[in-house]
Image (cartoon, rainbow, N blue to C red):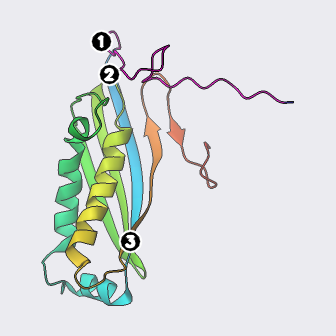
Amino acid sequence: MTTRPEITLTHLDEAGAAYMVDVTAKTPTVREARATAFVACSEAIVDALRGGAVPKGDVLAVARVAGIAATKKVPELLPLAHVIGVHGARVDLEIVDDGVRIETTVRTADRTGVEMEALTAATVAGLAIVDMVKGVDRGVELREARVVAKSGGRSGDWVRGDRGDEA
């Protein structure tokens, strides 16, 4: 019989109670995280996005700003997340044949990483797109939200591999 390695979750104490990890003694370092998401939508919506003809306005501009603004709200949404300085946030959107690809990059020089900020930016940008097109395309979907890379900090660099595992 094989034994599984013990998994230690950083936000749980010995008794299993949730707590905020104390990062006071950590030295601030430059950290970056990238995340992606995908909004699947109908051909009609893709055409409207390409032509700037969505009734509610400039969908991509709204999504970009929503994603950037979301990076600053993570501690309000996730109760154990630290308040950190978001020093750079970028939301890139690409219209493709079956929807919109979203890629976010978030940077800081702080004591903890920005993976959750990057992931939140990607999902909120996607939700903004869904919100703006759902009246025309009820089947619109937000899919495949994931952190794809991070750098900096004690654990170093990480990049998602082709199968979703570490490269």
Look at the image and give the residue range highlighted in magenta. Answer: 2-26
Q: Is residue 75 above or below residue 25?
A: below
| Residue that protrudes farthest toward the right in the picture | 1
| Residue that protrudes farthest toward the top in the picture | 25
Which residue is rendered at x = 62% and y = 46% of the image?
165
Which label sits on residue 111? Answer: 2
Which residue is rendered at x = 32% and y = 90% of the image?
44
Q: Earlier in the sequence, mark 2 or mark 3?
A: 2
- Residue at the spot of label 3: 141
Q: Quadrant of the N terminus?
A: top right
Residue type at the position of mark 1: Thr
Residue type at the position of mark 3: Glu
Q: Earlier in the sequence, mark 1 or mark 3?
A: 1
Q: Determine the main secondary structure of the stretch shown in magenta.
A: loop
Determine contact: label 1, label 2, CB under 8 Å: yes
Q: Nearer the viewer, residue 111 or 133?
A: 133
Spatial CA distance of label 1 from label 3 is 40 Å
Q: How far across and how far down the image is residue 25, in percent?
A: 33, 9
Tell me the element at label 2. Answer: loop
Q: How far across and how far down the image is residue 161, in percent?
A: 60, 50
Query: Is residue 87 left or right of 12 when viewed as pictured?
Result: left
How crowded pointer 1 is (Cα within 10 Å; few <14, some 14-19, many 20+) is rated as few
Q: Quadrant of the C terminus?
A: top right
Dot in front, 1 or 2: 1
Spatial CA distance of label 1 from label 2 is 8 Å
- Residue at the spot of label 1: 24
Quadrant assignment, res 138? bottom left
Dot in front, 2 or 3: 3
